[in-house]
Image (spheres, rainbow, N blue to C red):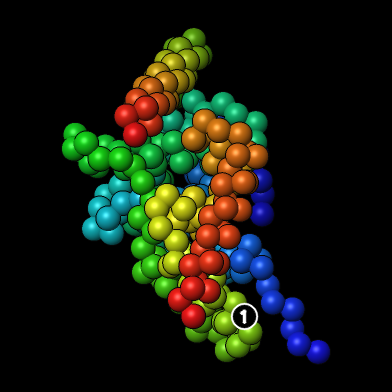
Amino acid sequence: VPKKELTPEEKLEALSQAAQAGWRKGHPVPDKHRTLVRNVVAKQLREEKTLSVAERRRMIQEEQRRMAEQQAQRQQREQRQERQR
Amino acid sequence: VEPLIELVRRYQETLDEEVREECALKILEQIYPPLTLFIRSHARAENCEDILQECLVAIFKSLRAFHGGTDEMFLGFVYRIARNKIADSFRGRKMELRIEADPEILREALAPLFDEPSLSPDTVAVLNEALELLAASDYPCVGWLWQHYVLGFSFVEMGALEGVTSDAVRKRIGRCLALAQKLVKSKV
């Protein structure tokens, strides 16, 4: 019995799974990036521990506000680029 | 594998150094492959290491501030940071953030699998045909196909990024696939 020809969608689905699995296998986290993250986390923790609860809350709110602002700016920039296109 | 969002929650709720570090490293394990693939797909190879390091610092510096309830939302947060860092790497040059559908990336991704003796010739043939489909596609199709099939973005995520509905993305991908197939057939 001849094999059923896969649709383009099915072929790309197979590629999708293989590429992601292969990339994962070929890119384990190197020690230098583990160390980088450890250092960032330790520094953050030291800073947080020196803050009072209220200050900590304010810091988180400030960070959230800054991220929301950046996101809004990025969206505006992308919309402008889209309109220009 | 523990859901990402639970690790993030645990990280946010504790001030215990050991627990923090354990959660951070588990989060890193999970986000590292998609993050590196995302960066490699959008930036020149020689800039990737710097961008990646800046992303990791930014992600773990602002992890406490993340507020979202799902793995997808957290990955969205990670990709947002990555997009910003990639855009920063253009250093003021007017460049559009777009996918570099470099076949070398796919060869690199598939290399560990092609080395496996258990991979059947049928599977290899299917993967090569899929690669042909991608190679036959041009912009903007190749960018959309790459985003969905290589980076693994859902139609919903792609729609949110482009400000269109997920249904519009699905139709777009369908049209691109039909076109790619036509182009491959016309070459035979």
x then y, percent, for residue B65: 49, 25
Residue found at x 46% / y 53% = B141
Which residue is most to the top?
Answer: A54
x then y, percent, for residue B122: 63, 84
Q: Nearer the viewer, residue B181 or A59?
A: B181
Quadrant position of residue A78: top left
Badge count: 1
- Residue ID for mark 1: B123
Which three-letter amino acid code belongs to the residue tagged 1?
Thr
Q: Nearer the viewer, residue B164 or B67?
A: B164
x then y, percent, for residue B34: 49, 53
Residue found at x 60% / y 39% = B168
Instruction: Examine the rendering and report whether any part of residue B16 can be seen.
Output: no
Residue found at x 62% / y 46% = B170
Residue found at x 45% / y 56% = B142
Q: Does A16 appear above or below A59?
A: below
| SS at circle 1 | helix
Instruction: Examine the rendering and report whether any part of residue A64 can be seen.
Output: yes
Q: Nearer the viewer, residue B124 or B54?
A: B124
